[in-house]
Each structure stands twice: as C-alpha cells, then as structure tokens.
Amino acid sequence: MIDARTRELIRSRIVDLVAIALDVSPMRVAGNVPVNSLRLDAACIETLTRDLSGWLDFEVDPLLWLEYSTIDDMANHLAGEIRIVGSPPAYTS
C-alpha cells in the first residue's frame, strides 16, 4: 500500500522543481495535467531528474517523464519505489 503522505510529499517536490524550472509559481503547475503540456525540454528533464534523484536518494529514470502522463501519476509511482528502497525524505520548501 502506498502511503498518501509520501505520495503528496513527492508530488509537492516535483511541482516545486517544475515551477522553478519553468520560472512560474508552483500554483501554476497542476499535478493532473499532461506532463507533455508542460513543454519541458531535454536539458530541463535532465536537471529535474538529477534534482529528484538527489532528494529521493535513489536513481530516478528520466524516462519517467515520458512513461507517466501526469505529475500525480509519477508521484504515485515514486511513492511505491520509496516503499521498496527505504523511508521518504524530509521536505521543506
């Protein structure tokens, strides 16, 4: 069972990272919109993946940005990975 708190923590972190990359308010990044509508280029995805991997303390596959249609879906997947590799990271915005 995926922990809802962990999923929300990861979702919030992804939203914040995407907002920083796009230079917009996190309020403008919805977790339920298609990732491809965010218009993230390859360099941006590389940076987002590296930052997310460092925060989660395990390797995140950059293809997740293509495999999961929304940030919510990606967060759900990564929350499941946390259950396998260890405890969720602390997050402060």
Image (cartoon, rainbow, N blue to C red):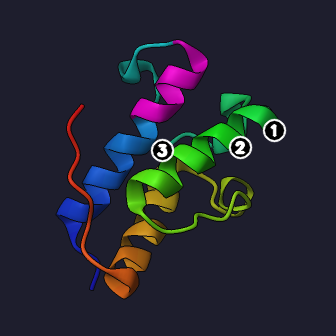
Q: Residue at x 47, y 28 (%)?
A: 29
For the residues marked 1 and 3, what is the alpha-carbon distance in whole angstroms? Answer: 21 Å
Q: Which mark is residue 42?
A: 1
In this picture, residue 24 sits left or right of residue 61: left
**Residue placed most toward the observer, 58 or 25:** 58
Q: Position of residue 1 (x, y in %)?
A: 27, 86
In this picture, residue 43 sits left or right of residue 6: right
Q: Residue at x 66, y 65 (%)?
A: 61
Amino acid type of disc 3? Asn
Instruction: Please determine whether, in this image, residue 80 is positioned above or below residue 55.
Output: below
Decide whether residue 56 is among the magenta residues.
no
Foreground label between 1 and 3: 1
**Residue placed most toward the observer, 40 or 44:** 44
Q: What are the residue bounds of the magenta stretch?
A: 16-23
Circles 1 and 2: CB distance less than 8 Å? yes
Specify the quadrant that holds the C terminus: top left
Badge 1 marks a residue whose secondary structure is: helix
The residue to which callout 3 is attached is 32
Please tell me which of labels 1 and 3 falls first in the chain.
Answer: 3
